[in-house]
Image (tube, helix red, strand yellow):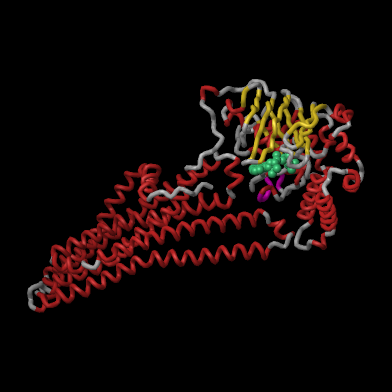
Amino acid sequence: MNNKTKYKSFTLFKRLWTGYLRNHIFLLLVAMVFMVIEGSTLGGLSYMLQPMFDLVMVKGDAGAIWFVATAILMLFVVRGITGIIHRTLLTKVSYEASTQIQVDLLNHTLHLDNSFHSKTSPGALIERVQGDVISIQHLWNTILVNAGRDSIALLSLLGVAISIDWMWTLVTVMGAPVLLLPSLAVQRYVRRKSGYLREIASDRTLRLDEIFHGIIPIKLNRMEPYQLSRFSKLSQDWVKSTIKTVAGQASIPALVDLAVGFGFFSVLLYGGPQIISGEKSIGEFMSFFTAMALAFQPMRRLGNVASNWEIMAASLNRIFNLFDTVPDIQDTISTKIKVPKNFDVSFDNVHLSYDSSPVLNGLSFNAPHGKTTAIVGESGAGKSTLFNALTRLVDPKSGSINIDGINTKNISLENLRSLFSVVSQDALLFDETLIENILLGNKNISKEKIKQVLDDANVTKFISTLSNGLETKVGPRGSNLSGGQRQRVAIARALLRDTPILLLDEATSALDAESEKFVQEALEKLSKGRTTLVIAHRLSTIHDADQIIVLSKGRIAEIGTHENLINQKGLYSNLYSLQSKPNKEVDVLSNNSTLSSNSTKSLLKLKGQSSLVENEHNYPSLNSKQLNWLQRGLIAIARKLTF
Ligand SMILES: Nc1ncnc2c1ncn2[C@@H]1O[C@H](COP(=O)(O)OP(=O)(O)OP(=O)(O)O)[C@@H](O)[C@H]1O
Ligand SMILES: [Mg+2]
């Protein structure tokens, strides 16, 4: 993720103000008025001490007691009420603005393209949208209250002090300028440390996200100690950096303490003799001393504003860096934008690379409207990349991809993506009910249509086995459903989307024969009348395709119908006969001269693992569903190795 730009404090504040705080200017001003009132009550309080001492205590004026006592009571009442009002207003502004930042960040991140998301881990993004925004939300409230209320309090207290004796005031604050240089150094230190702290927080979330997503492979590979030690190390770093940041932050109030102590010391030495000689009254001295004592806390808090800002700036820097990351793939200028009417798909001499490694090397073919085109080829041949290029998740270096003869770059991204339904191996299911997963928030679908879709997708066949039927919660990523059931949910979604082009990326390859039958049936209904491109490893599933493309190293090696290709006795025909043998893994090992010795070894190992898994005593921590899942995964990998 681009995190290189180090913005100046002024730029960060300006962007925060213009983008998010300015909209709330009215509430901020009202809050400010109440902060001014609350802050000035401290000045009022210290001012009232002079009549209290001089009139009530020294002169014994009983009539003044009521006046002084009521005035002090009123000051505290005003202080309490104004405090509640400005805190509530500021919390409203702070939460509304920070939630807006989160929504905008999510919106921005959702529109960043594949190249960004394949390089940035979800954990790091979660930390940026959640952690960084929460950190600024918490801090700017504190900063606003401190800067607003405390600076007014300080000013009013200084006003009272000056009105009593400007010379005493000068003597007291003499130590303050000494604070400037050390506090600047501390601020720089705090900013550096808090930037690092945010990076560690991001790494921690990243690791947690990886661990919880990969819990089964972690258990199977006995990676628990490795993962734990990595997380502990990061956590130790986090604790150390937090301590350093807090120590840095705390050193400014400590410097304020020193300066204040020095101020009290000097004013006592200077003012004490003046009281003894009767030049000044005790009331004046008490009022002055209280003003200075009351100024102590606001001063400490103001001392912290700068370091709080530095911590907030570290998060703002990360947030604005993410905002400034622009997608590589964007809509072209609107005048060129066209809408396809017919849905044949063609690739014309397409070259595509990820960074500098070429994946598609001059790929040309035509997938006719309403027909099924199957794509087969070795693992890494570029099949999924072909789909990604078609949906513009990634753009080719040269050549053109067309729908109805229109270059996909001249179709708006929104329009283009609404042409496709993609069903792949991992159907993305959310932790909601089955029906919510199918409807995806679309409320305008008739009951008849829903029933038709559930029947066609073969979902109806398994609903009765679920405890709450369509209202059953499917669990995180659909973990309470079997692989085949998840696929059928994905097909039901695709049927509802009713798009003209269908992309199937190994939709059935992780399924056993029984599930595959149901899914295959549903897919056939789904693909009727649509331009369908299907990637398959199991060649038996694509017999009836209108054309089959055999892809090798990003180029077309063979193209034709199943019969044509079998008659050609080339790559496809060899693979087909290998896959048709009953004990194909063993046959592949003996017949496939192209299989490298490494692949052979891996395959044997996988076969071994797969039968190990059959014996559930070998993996006591897994339930039978997880074992079955693992076994299917191993078989799928073994299949890929044999292709
Ligand atoms: N986001 C990416 N960044 C860099 N390289 C990538 C990326 N995605 C794929 N590749 C590389 O591109 C090549 C083709 O990958 P692709 O996923 O298209 O293969 P495939 O034919 O679908 O293979 P499989 O049958 O295993 O799914 C591979 O060598 C892969 O390492
Ligand atoms: Mg693939």
Query: Where is residue 298 shown, x and y percent of the image?
Result: 29, 63
Does 638 sit left or right of 357 as displayed? right
Segment colored magenta: 468-476
Residue 591 or 269: which is nearer the viewer? 591
Q: Does the magenta portion include 471?
A: yes
The residue at 55%/49% (across/down) is: 125
Q: Is residue 321 left or right of residue 85?
A: right
Residue 620 in view here: yes
- Please state the horizontal and vertical placement of residue 448, each as a whole percent of the image: 69, 31
Q: Is residue 214 above or below residue 376?
A: below
Q: Nearer the viewer, residue 449 or 515?
A: 515
Nearest the camera: 451 or 640? 640
Residue 346, relative to residue 63: is it above or below? Answer: above
Q: Residue at x 37, y 42 (%)?
A: 18
Residue 235 is situated, as x and y percent measured from the top left of the image, at 55, 64
**Identity of the residue furthest to the front in this view:** 356
Residue 66 falls left or right of residue 96: left
